[in-house]
């Protein structure tokens, strides 16, 4: 996970000020990074770089929508229930927040909460505008 952490840092640096890079890098790495987010709660470097990368990628609405579609594909049984879908989309971040909180790593917990807030803000706005598919 140390190598992955360094790669995530480098990818974040590549796309931090470039929207096109965010949209190019996001679909390639964000699903795996999102899935791995709660897996290494004792590795502060990994959690930090994963949050920074995902936070940078989730500035792009296309990447947030891509994550929504990815989760919808994994949870077809709940795609018609917006409340359950919101929960499914934020589950990995919530799991990581819980794991980090047990370690009393307040800075990491705050970064995860910022990531969850950014993701939820997009989801709520997109839902209000009718931009989220309920069927995958």
Image (cartoon, rainbow, N blue to C red):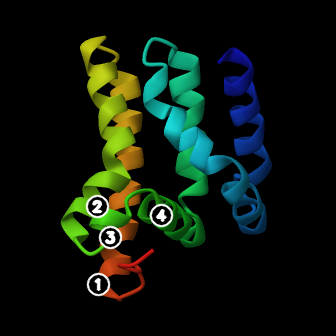
Upstream in sequence: badge 3 or badge 2 = 3
Q: Nearer the viewer, mark 3 or mark 2?
A: 3
Upstream in sequence: badge 4 or badge 1 = 4
Residue on which disc 3 sits: 79
Q: Secondary structure at mark 3?
A: loop
Residue at horizontal 77 percent and vertical 36 percent from the top? 10
Q: Nearer the viewer, mark 4 or mark 1?
A: 4
Q: Residue furthest front?
A: 77
Q: Are marks 1 and 3 in contact (CB under 8 Å)?
A: no
Mark 1 and mark 3: Cα distance apart in space:
16 Å
Q: Which mark is drawn over residue 128?
A: 1
Upstream in sequence: badge 4 or badge 2 = 4
Mark 2 and mark 1: Cα distance apart in space:
13 Å
Q: Nearer the viewer, mark 2 or mark 1?
A: 2
Upstream in sequence: badge 1 or badge 3 = 3
Mark 4 and mark 3: Cα distance apart in space:
8 Å
Residue on which disc 4 sits: 73
Q: Where residue 78 sits in the image (x, y, percent)?
A: 28, 65
Residue on which disc 2 sits: 86
Q: In the rendered image of this protein, does residue 20 appear above or below residue 31?
A: below
Residue at horizontal 51 percent and vertical 26 percent from the top? 47
Mark 4 and mark 2: Cα distance apart in space:
14 Å
């Amino acid at each position: 996970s140390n190598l992955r952490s360094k790669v995530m840092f480098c990818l974040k640096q590549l796309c931090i000020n470039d929207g096109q890079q965010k949209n190019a890098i996001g679909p390639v790495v964000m699903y795996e990074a999102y899935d791995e987010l709660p897996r290494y709660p004792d590795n502060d470097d990994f959690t930090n770089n994963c949050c920074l990368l995902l936070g940078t990628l989730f500035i792009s609405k296309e990447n947030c929508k891509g994550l929504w579609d990815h989760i919808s594909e994994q949870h077809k049984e709940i795609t018609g229930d917006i409340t359950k879908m919101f929960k499914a989309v934020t589950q990995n971040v919530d799991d990581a927040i819980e794991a980090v909180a047990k370690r009393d790593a307040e800075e990491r917990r705050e970064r995860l909460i910022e990531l969850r807030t950014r993701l939820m803000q997009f989801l709520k706005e997109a839902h209000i505008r009718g931009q989220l598919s309920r069927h995958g």
